[in-house]
Each structure stands twice: as C-alpha cells, then as structure tokens.
Image (cartoon, rainbow, N blue to C red):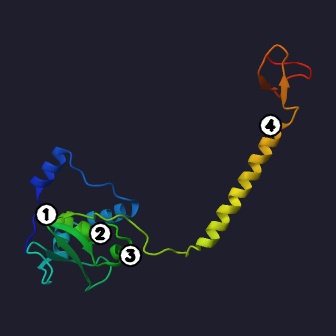
Amino acid sequence: MLFLPDYMRAHLRSGLGLRGRHLCQVEMKAKKAADEITFAGACTRVVQTESSGLEDKPGDTEIQVESFTQDNTHYDISIKEEKITSCSCPAYTESRLTCKHMFVALRVTNYIIFLPHTITPKRRSVEIDEEDILDEQRAHKRRLIVKIRDGIDKLERADYWIRDENVTCWMPCHKTALPGCYLP
C-alpha cells in the first residue's frame, strides 16, 4: 500500500493557525528521530492493517511500524476514530509520551495524534506513611506557634513601645533613634 502525504490538510491547518500541542523534551527528541528518516524510508517502515478485535468500531484500524533499533521487530499503533491513540513500544507504554513510531505514522498517514490523558507517574517511588506526614505537620505547627509567641512577647515588652506625651496613640520606637528622642 502506498501512502501519500496530505499537503492540502497541512496547508489548511497552518493557514487557519491550528497547531498541535507543545511537546516536551523527550517528545522533541522522538520527533527529531522520526523526521531524520526520509519520506520514502518512513513509508517502508509503516504497514497499515485492519484490526480484528471484537469491540473495535468499523473505522478503527491498526498500523505496524518497524522498530528503529531492533531488526524484525514491529510495534502496533492503535487508530481509533481516525486518530493515533497508542503504541505498543516500551517508550510509550512506560511514559505515555508520544513516541517516534507515532511521529513516523503521523508523517506517512492522514491520521492525527490524539492523547487526551495526562502524564502521571506509573507508581510512586516511595510509599507515603500518613502517620509520619501528620507527625511532621504537627511538629511544624508547634514550631510556628513558638515563633509566634516569641514575636508577641517581644511586642509586649515595655521598652519596645514609647508613649509620646503629645500624641494619644502608641507607636513603635525606631531602632536608629537616640535614647531620649521621640519620633513624631
């Protein structure tokens, strides 16, 4: 099967200002690796097949893309509702980031990449102990209370406040004022 690029679609998308989402650094490297392959080379790496799953819709297909690093290895790219949704390569399954196989399929076919999910870690590296977290938070609050009480004690000291005979309000004494001098 021969794949031809859809120049009209690309022209309309750029003319209307419809751009894809911003790519992270890992995705940029994957896109660069996919773009380094010539169009003819990319066409030889991609094979489109019909999916035979029971729950698939009529428009759902599957594309196989040859591995960049391993000989005789192909990865399956799922197409749902005319959109590239996933790849079976380890790079995609571990990180859920757009992989180079998806970018090659994007270059060769008329499908767009659609990844609605957010990037979340596969699992936590350290299990969180809620009791330890609560103890740390309580200790932090106790330290804050001690600091607040120290600040209040400093404010209550008699030498901090000076009463001016002509003014009816209290005001703090400026640190640079000379002894016996009152600030207006």
- The residue tagged 3 is 94
The reply, left or right, for residue 56 in relation to residue 171 is left
Q: Crowding at label 1, few (<14), some or many (≥20) Cα neighbours within 10 Å? A: some
Distance of mark 2 from mark 4, alpha carbons?
Answer: 64 Å
Where residue 14 appears, as percent x and y from the top left, is 18, 48
Which element carries disc 1, helix, strand or loop?
Answer: loop
- The circle on residue 110 is 1
On screen, residue 169 above or below 76 = above
Closer to the camera, 45 or 129? 129
Where residue 111 appears, as percent x and y from the top left, is 16, 64
The nearer-to-camera label among 4 and 1 is: 4
The nearer-to-camera label among 2 and 1 is: 1
The nearer-to-camera label among 2 and 3 is: 3
Q: Earlier in the sequence, mark 3 or mark 4?
A: 3
- The residue tagged 4 is 155
Closer to the camera, 4 or 38? 4
Distance of mark 2 from mark 1, alpha carbons?
Answer: 16 Å
Q: Quadrant of residue 43?
A: bottom left
Which element carries disc 2, helix, strand or loop?
Answer: helix
